[in-house]
């Protein structure tokens, strides 16, 4: 029999999306799964819906806890899981019926402890784009190539999804509680620990962009958590994978630019000071990024615009 896969789904105020998410997991072609719904202190009817789901399928386990954020819910789900393999799905997203099967097959074929697939991004209220191809690309990256690919934002995603992991990896690694953008540093640490990752280019994970998501929400200083998480990534890359440092600076430049542009030009006080600090960091990186032929277009644009400080500030 195939090993038990624990699918951890943190749930917080996602009543309109929860049915689609959970149903997509229930209908997996890989059937030896347990579905762990972690109700992270929802104030809508999400918790009640979770309990109703548990009555309909014995594989569904529900846990209600005080709100602690996404990382805390994931860590809690890991502790409650029984599978030797684990996968995470955000409760406002959903997956194809072959999602877990494809991940498991990639894990076995790649002879590694982490496997990943691709995501299909769509905006709330719209339908995902359908992708058709004869065969999906399969590749096994070593740690350095994986981090370079992820930081250049080519194929590998920094998110906890769309991946499958051997649960034992989380014996010493947890998601940082209370932080935004918690995935990128944790994914880097996991790839570093394993040494390689298998990639199957099947767009099995449907990632929904909502109007009130972290990416689309207006700026608040908490978003600077991204820079804290990137500092963890930088330390690992500089120390162990120096060949990927160019990819790191490209990622950092994109992140700095996105944060900076998220702050209105007419901001005052501390927020305007933050904007100025971000722009100075962009200026510090610009030459390095412009000389990197592999840098992303948005990182290059940020670097060019940094020469026009007065115009952009």
Image (tube, rainbow, N blue to C red):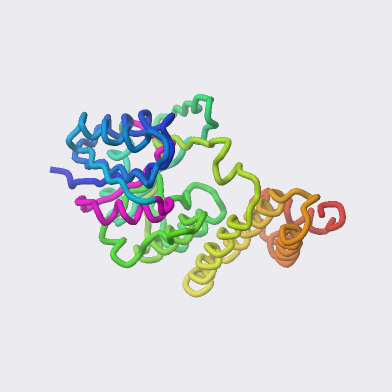
| Residue occupying the far bottom of the picture | 239
Question: In the rendered image of this protein, does residue 100 appear above or below residue 168?
Answer: above
Q: The C terminus is located in which quarter? A: bottom right
- Towards the viewer: 8 or 51: 51
**Residue at point 32%, 34% (across, down):** 48
Using the rendered view, name the quadrant where residue 134 is placed.
top left
Q: Is residue 130 left or right of residue 228?
A: left
Asked whether residue 86 is drawn in magenta, I would say yes
Using the rendered view, name the quadrant where residue 197 is placed.
bottom left
Q: Is residue 163 left or right of residue 300?
A: left
Q: The N terminus is located in which quarter? A: top left
| Residue occupying the far left of the picture | 1
- Towards the viewer: 26 or 112: 26
Residue 290: in sight, yes or no? no
**Residue at point 43%, 61% (across, down):** 176
Residue 161 percent across, percent down from the top left: 40, 46
Asked whether residue 288 is drawn in magenta, I would say no
């Amino acid at each position: 029999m195939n090993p038990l896969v624990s699918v951890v789904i943190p749930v917080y105020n996602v009543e309109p999306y929860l049915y689609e998410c959970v149903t997509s997991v229930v209908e997996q072609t890989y059937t030896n799964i347990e579905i762990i719904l972690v109700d992270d202190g929802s104030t809508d009817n999400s918790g009640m819906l979770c309990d109703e789901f548990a009555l309909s399928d014995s594989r569904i386990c529900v846990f209600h806890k005080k709100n602690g954020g996404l990382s805390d819910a994931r860590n809690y789900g890991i502790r409650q899981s029984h599978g030797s393999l684990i996968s995470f799905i955000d409760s406002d997203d959903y997956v194809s019926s072959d999602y877990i099967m494809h991940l498991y097959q990639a894990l076995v074929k790649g002879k590694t402890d982490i496997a990943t697939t691709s995501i299909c991004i769509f905006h709330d209220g719209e339908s995902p784009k359908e992708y058709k191809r004869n065969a999906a690309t399969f590749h096994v990256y070593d740690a350095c190539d994986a981090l370079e690919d992820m930081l250049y934002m080519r194929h590998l995603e920094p998110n906890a999804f769309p991946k499958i992991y051997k649960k034992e990896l989380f014996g010493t690694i947890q998601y940082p509680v209370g932080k935004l953008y918690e995935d990128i540093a944790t994914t880097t640490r996991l790839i570093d620990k394993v040494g390689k990752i298998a990639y199957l280019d099947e767009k099995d994970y449907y990632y929904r962009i909502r109007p009130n998501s972290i990416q689309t929400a207006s700026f608040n200083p908490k978003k600077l958590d991204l820079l804290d998480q990137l500092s963890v990534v930088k330390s690992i890359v500089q120390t162990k994978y120096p060949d990927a440092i160019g990819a790191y600076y490209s990622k950092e430049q994109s992140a700095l630019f996105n944060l900076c542009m998220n702050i209105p030009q007419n901001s005052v006080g501390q927020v305007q000071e933050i904007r100025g600090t971000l722009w100075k960091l962009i200026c510090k990186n610009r030459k390095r990024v412009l000389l990197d032929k592999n840098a992303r277009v948005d990182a290059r644009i940020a670097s060019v615009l940094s020469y026009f400080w007065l115009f952009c500030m």
